[in-house]
Image (cartoon, grey):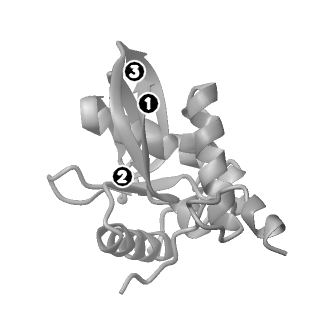
Amino acid sequence: MPSLTIRQYGDPVLKERARDVEDIDGSVAGLVDSMVETMYAAPGTGLAANQVGVQRRIFVYDIGEGARTVINPRIVESDGEWAFDEGCLSVPGLSWEIVRPNAVHLVGLDLDGNEISVEATELEGRVFQHEIDHLDGILLVQRLDEDQRKEALKILRSRTLDLSPSDPDGLSNLFSL
């Protein structure tokens, strides 16, 4: 069972920009351990701290090479374009084709406070961009084109209001009164 609860679409914490980590100490290491456990239990490829209600610039990820942590991440360079079907643990069960840069150069700190610099493409680069979006208060839904966003918001509203997928606007209930 995951030790942290993943915040879902509609939670205001997901719209706030996370603050930089000032000191990397035992509490940060404990948070990272819990985040990795939660990410694997979800299951997911990446998890940002604000997705579990912690407003700090930290994310964890695993693209098949073991869990990694990035603290105070920044993308300093990007190039190309890559369309890929992208989902999100805070918007479970939904995914959309999103166009993002194909190559990125990420800088930040590891859990020991050492500077890291990673040039990543395709999936790894996409994970970096997705998790940094979270830390900046940007949700996947905001990356959709207008038609996709309208459909996504319709589905998400029906979930929030606990409406049947066959009646996403709730109007059939009005006529049955």
- CA distance for labels 3 and 2: 24 Å
- CA distance for labels 1 and 2: 28 Å
Q: Split into 4 quadrants, where in the image is the C terminus?
A: bottom right
Q: Residue at x 26, y 37 (%)?
A: 123
Q: Nearer the viewer, mark 1 or mark 2?
A: 1
Q: Is residue 131 above or below residue 166?
A: above
Tag on residue 101? Answer: 3
Mark 3 / mark 2, whichever is N-terminal: 3
Q: Is residue 134 above or below residue 26?
A: above
Residue identified by numbered label 1: 98
On the rendered structure, is 62 left or right of 79? left
Please name the amino acid that badge 3 sits on: Pro
Q: Name the residue at the bottom extreme.
A: 1
Secondary structure under the numbered disc 1 in the rendered image: strand
Secondary structure under the numbered disc 3 in the rendered image: loop
Residue identified by numbered label 2: 110
- Which corner quadrant of the image does residue 85 belong to? top left
Q: Nearer the viewer, mark 3 or mark 1?
A: 1
Judge whether residue 23 can be spotted in this image.
no
Please name the amino acid that badge 2 sits on: Asp
Q: Nearer the viewer, mark 3 or mark 2?
A: 3
Q: Position of residue 23 (x, y in %)?
A: 55, 61
Q: Position of residue 117 (x, y in %)?
A: 33, 34
Mark 1 / mark 2, whichever is N-terminal: 1
Q: Residue at x 52, y 61 (%)?
A: 49
